[in-house]
Amino acid sequence: MRSLGYQRTISIENFRNPNFSLVAEILYWFIQRFDPKADIPDDIQDDKDRVEFMCAVGRFFYSNLKIQLNLKKLYTANNSCLPELLKIAEIFYNAKNTIVNSNDIDFTGELDISSKNKEIKELRELSSSIVDTGIGLLDLLEKEKVLKSQREKALEFLDNLTRGGDSVKEKEQIKNRVVSILDNQDKTLEQLDTHISQLKQKESQLDEEIKLKSIESERAEKRLEGLKESGKQKESQLDEEIKLKSIESERAEKRLEGLIGVRPKVDSEQIQLESELQHIYRIYVEKVRNHDYMEQKLEEFNMIQSLKERIDLSEMEKIKHLNQEAKKQLIFGDNERMTNDDELDGEGNYDYKKVELNNRMKNNNREQSNNTRTNNRGAKQDQLNDEDDDAFGEEEEEGDADDDEDDDAFG
């Protein structure tokens, strides 16, 4: 058990007294080692659970490993259960040894198949015989139910023979059965012979196919070698072409350097004309820019003049309105004068001279205020006009100076 990988140490002393938990643990470990996905109940507290556990274990090992265990001995869980456990342990131990021996084989060396054709044929025959025996075993296991009843009848027949029944009838039955068995064996032998002949034919076909495949592989290897040689030749040709192209490119670069050092007269004239063209283009751009600027200033001047005209009209309307109000006050102001004390004399009568003087004073004051307003507005308009004329003159002088400079530069 230690060689199989069981972690717990086990001795015979563990089984002197009934130890069902240890036996169940070992059986469950074997099942998990064989099939980790096996569905086995692990509850062993009651007697019913233990019986179910043992029945499940017996079914598992009989269906998978074809081991028929004595469940009564295993249920006792004492020294009598050790042979049953050894049956299972021997199968696992043998399987482990076969795996170890197969791993010891060295597959690193090259295999010479031609010298081992006989062994290959023997292995094929063995594999075919193993497959046939496996199929026969499956058929027999499927026919187990029918054969069981026949076996029981045969046992009864033998019991009758031993007890001393009618020996003549029993002998005839035995002869008939032996004859039928022999016939069946002859048929099976014929079938086996035909099967063997078919297998031999298949084997010869396989040998022919192997020969053809070997011939095709040799041809493919030869083609590969030819392709490799042609590839090497092409590589050498390409290397030579690359060297020639590199030499030609170096020569072309040297020629280019020599041509760049020697410039013709046409190039110098072209450079001079290009410089003159750039200068003319700059002058053109400046003039276009000045023209746009003058147009913009003209638009602004026109806007200012229109605003001034509107302001003058509004102020003239205000002056007219004030004059009209003054006239109304002159016309309708007699009633107010009658109530003023300043216009009365010492006796309480109105002094018409004082009234006329007061009216004249008021009119003079109004005229002076109107004149001051108009004078102020005219002075402001004159200042604005002078500023606009100065700005326009400066712009014209700047434009003339720019034109003179451009003409000098162009000359």
Image (tube, rainbow, N blue to C red):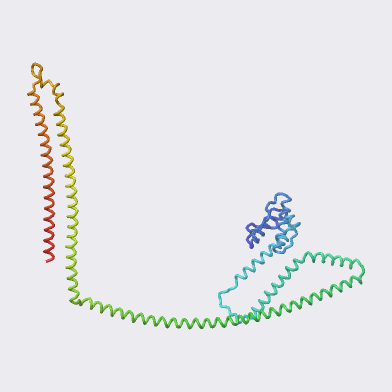
Left/right placement of residue 2 relative to residue 380 reads right
Residue 4 appears in view: yes
Left/right placement of residue 239 relative to residue 299 reads right
Left/right placement of residue 338 relative to residue 31 reads left
Q: Position of residue 1 (x, y in %)?
A: 66, 61
Q: Position of residue 205 (x, y in %)?
A: 64, 81
Above or below: residue 321 compared with residue 103:
above
> In terms of depth relative to the viewer, which is nearer, 326 or 161?
326
> In terms of depth relative to the viewer, which is nearer, 80 or 60?
60
Q: Residue at x 87, y 67 (%)?
A: 157
Q: Position of residue 253 (x, y in %)?
A: 27, 77
Q: Quadrant of residue 36?
A: bottom right
> In terms of depth relative to the viewer, which is nearer, 156 or 11?
156
Above or below: residue 78 compared with residue 325:
below
Above or below: residue 220 compared with residue 36:
below
Left/right placement of residue 324 relative to residue 131 reads left
Rendered-image quadrant of the C terminus: bottom left
Residue 17 appears in view: no
Q: Residue at x 19, y 48 (%)?
A: 303
Q: Quadrant of residue 290?
A: bottom left
Above or below: residue 365 compared with residue 344:
below
Q: Position of residue 320 (x, y in %)?
A: 16, 36
Q: Which residue of the protein is positioned furthest toward the front in this rendering?
A: 331
> In terms of depth relative to the viewer, which is nearer, 352 or 322?
352
Q: Residue at x 13, y 62 (%)?
A: 406
Q: Quadrant of residue 284?
A: bottom left
